[in-house]
Structure formats: C-alpha cells, structure tokens
Image (cartoon, rainbow, N blue to C red):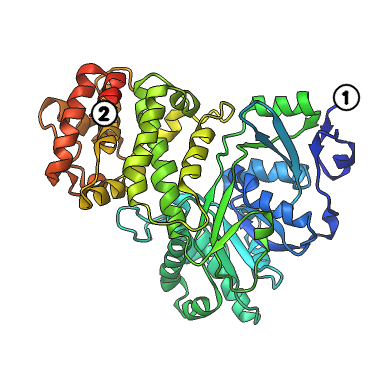
Amino acid sequence: MTPQRLNNSSLHKLPGSVSVPDYARSGISPGIVHVGVGNFHRAHEAYYTDQLLNRGEIEWGICGVCLLENDLKMYQTLVSQDGLYALVIKEADGSRRVRVIGSIVEYLYAPSDPSAVIAKMADPSIRIISLTITEGGYNYDPSTGKFNFKNPDIQWDLRHPSRPRTIFGYLTAAFRLRQQNGVPGLTVLSCDNIQQNGSVCRNMLRTYMGESMPELRDWAAEQVSFPNSMVDRITPVTTTRDVEELRDRFHLEDSWPVSCEPFIQWVIEDHFSRGRPPWEKAGVQFTEDVEPYEKMKIRLLNAGHSLMGFTGTLMGYSTIYEAVGDDLIRRFLQGFMDQEVTPVLGPVEGIDLTSYKETLIQRFANPHMEDRLSRICSESSSKIPKFLIPTIEEQLEQGGQVKYSALIIAAWCRTLEQTGTGGSGPEVRDVMADMLVQRAITSRDKDPLAFLKIPEIFGDLHRSGRFVRTYLPVMEHLRTHGPAATISYVLKV
C-alpha cells in the first residue's frame, strides 16, 4: 500500500488501522486560541478537544499560535497538513494506537503577522486562550518569583505594544482591543508544568500591565479568569524512527507525528469567565482546588523521576525504563513513595494513592517511551527545591523518616562530583552547573556539608541535625561502596 501524505483530502484513503476524525472539520469554529503548539499540547489538550469534537461540540475548535521564530517548522508542518497530525499511543506491550487529530482547525505564525494574532485573541468567538510556553515563558525568577523586566523581549514589547514578542505583550494588546470593542473577557488557561500555573500567569501579567498599560488592570481583574491546572502525559521528542515507523507500519506520511504513553490526566479548577468545553466528557477532572493534585504529582512522579535520574545514572543506565527495571532501584522508589511521600500527602479527591503509585511504576516501565536520564537530571537545581525539599521539611517536622531523600541528594552530589573530577559522570546541564560541581567536590575534600550549603536549593537543611546525621553516613557509604550497595544499605537500615 502506498503511504498517504497526511492532509484533509487523504483522510478517507488511510488504512482502517488509523482512526480519523468523525466530524466535518470545515464546520468547526475556533473557540480556543492555543499559544505554543508543541508535542505536549498535541498529545494533551488537542487530544482531549478532538474527543469532544467527535461528540458534536463544534464551537470548541482550536486556533494554534506559533509564538516564536524557532516555531516556524511546526507552523509549516501544520500548514502543509491542514492542521492534521498523527498521535501514536505506545503501549508497554509494543502495540500502537494511531489517531489523526483534527482539533487544530486554524494556525497562525505570530512573528510574521502579530496583528492577526492579536485580532484573533480579541475575537468575540474566542473564550479561552490556553498556553504551553514552558516555565521560561512566564519570565520570572524562580528563586524570587519576581517578573524579569530586563528581558530584551519584554523591553521590546513595552516600546512596541502593537508588535509584541512575548505572551504578555500579546495578551495585553488583545485585552485592550477587547475592551475598546466592548467584547467581554475570557479565560487564560495555563497548561504548563508549574505549580499554581494560573496564579503565576495572572501575577506576571498583572505586573507587566503595571508598566505597559496600568489602566487595563482593573478590566482584566473583572473580566479574565486564570484557573490553575495540573497536566500529565509523558510525551517524548519526535524521532526519525517515529516518522519511519508510521510510514512503514501504517502507510501514513506525517512530517511531525507525536508519540505518547497511554496514561493521560488533566485536573482543572472550574473557574471560567465565559464558559468552557465539557472536557469532563473526555475524562478531564474539574475541581475547586487543584493544589492537592499538584502536590501528589510533584512529590511522587517528579521526585520519583529525579530519584531514578540520579541513582540510575550512577548505576550506568541511560533511560527511565532501564532504571526502574533494576530491582534495587524499583524497591528504593517504592519505599520512597510509601514511607516518605505518602505520609505527608493529604487526601486527594477521586484518587486512590495506592493505585496511582502502581500506575506510576507501570508508566516508568514502558520501554517505548525512551525517556532519557540526562533529560531528567537536567536543571535539577530548579527541580529539587520543588519536588523533594518540601517532603524532607514536612517529614522532619513530623518526626518522620528521611533516609530515602538523603540518598537522593547524596546520589545527585555524587554524579556531580564524578563529572567534576573527570570521572564517568554525565554532562551537567544546569544554570548553576559550575557551583554545583564545585560544591560537590568540596563536600568530598574539605567540608562534608558544602553541597547542602546552597541556600537557593536546600535552604537551612544543613542546620538540621537529624537530617545531617542521616545524610553523612549515606554519602560516605556511596563514595566507598558504590550505588548498589548503598541502596541495599538504605533499604535495610
């Protein structure tokens, strides 16, 4: 069978093994503008919305906006394929489920026509502007939470409000146009992996407006809502092999397909200014407070990733699948989740924590995700203060156990130390790389607590006698006996 190039005209020619939209795309109108059309959005929000369109919710199509100049390839792909792409769900047993997603019915490239994007955001039919712009797109200092006005693109936006470059310039210009035209507000829905993402977006935008258009802040406060949300689906980078497999196994030519795991989750605070899609029909959970779900995910999944990243690297593995496949690491992960994280998690409505943890391990063990430990370990200086340190602090306050957490930090220190001394450690990709490596080496040669004495990461943890008494023997055991013996040691003590 000749492979079919993906576009509207080829949908009816695809093999039966490929699911296609059950709706007429020509009749779909955008009710959502989404900024940041990347793999995660296409495996998550666009996937959920595609399910709704199949149910006849035709007013909730998506207009995708490629915001940055380096998004040009994605824009060109969407244009050439009429907004269509293949989503490949990779099951752990090696089977594949392929669905062509049709929910992106319009697409704009902001750098070439900013006014078109502003006009679209201000269109009365648009009731939600959603975002996947990465943590860096929110333009704040993680250590202080303050907006970065020194960013050259922010300075450009302040001087050229009709030709913005950042999301803050676009939102401000669109809100101003809505106000001028008597169009009511809407909802800005962050889908980025940031705690309290809606609140962060609202606060950063309000700060920006204070400099650019302070008279608009009251209108935005009354007319625009910023619900927090928690998103989850492992979505690796698209590879050449993904493209070739789709062509060879499913006879489908797609320049940029998306692969993902079967698991998907989205929890959203039900605070929308002008209505919302009935995403609950597709499995989305709505709540009044997303914080318990965020805490659960960050403390279990994200901290679990870091645990496997550091220990797996020391054990010579390169992917999450390999690391969790090691019985010692798996038992260590299970003990950490059960004995140190679960005791400090409150109730999470609608979630059975035992089942959630079992599902996490099954997800990590999917050999087809190929999530690399080098990615997991990158930028750990910004991850560990959010993913792990709060668990340690709460366990110390409650008189709980911290031996698993101590080994996670010790393993991080050891990988840095090995890198800095010309050993087998991986390249350190972190904004604090030089300091991290230097402190790790100093902790071995001069001051055993030097690594813990990085306040931006660990706060006052080095002053906790109980933690230090746990950490130092683990660190010494790791240097002397290696990772496998040290994990066994921690499991037994």
User: Looking at the image, which residue is at 68% across and 46% down?
Assistant: 75
Q: Give percent across and percent down for residue 162.
A: 57, 66
Tell me the amino acid under the disc marked 2: Val
In this view, the residue in front, 177 or 459, is: 459
Local SS, label 2: helix
Tell me the amino acid under the disc marked 1: Met
Bin the neighbour count of mark 1 within 10 Å (Cα to Cα): few under 14, some 14-19, many 20 and up: few
> In front of the other: label 1 or label 2?
2
Asked if disc 1 and disc 2 are in contact, CB closer than 8 Å, the reply is no
**Among the 4 quarters of the image, the one containing residue 411:** top left
In this view, the residue in front, 394 or 198, is: 394
Number of callouts in the render? 2
| Quarter of the rendering occupied by the N terminus | top right
Q: Is residue 463 visible?
A: yes
| Quarter of the rendering occupied by the C terminus | top left
Going by the image, does 387 lie left or right of 168?
left
Bin the neighbour count of mark 2 within 10 Å (Cα to Cα): few under 14, some 14-19, many 20 and up: some
Going by the image, does 302 lie left or right of 391?
right
* Separation of residues labelled 1 and 2 (CA atoms): 56 Å
User: Looking at the image, which residue is at 56% across and 26% down?
Assistant: 367
Residue ID for mark 2: 490
Q: Give percent across and percent down for residue 218.
A: 48, 80
Q: Give percent across and percent down for residue 406.
A: 25, 36
In this picture, is 312 found above or below 456? above
**Among the 4 quarters of the image, the one containing residue 20:** top right
In this view, the residue in front, 447 or 140, is: 447
Q: Give percent across and percent down for residue 473.
A: 16, 29
Q: Is residue 441 visible?
A: no
Going by the image, does 467 lie left or right of 378?
left
User: Looking at the image, which residue is at 12% across and 43% down?
Assistant: 465
Q: Earlier in the sequence, mark 1 or mark 2?
A: 1
Residue ID for mark 1: 1
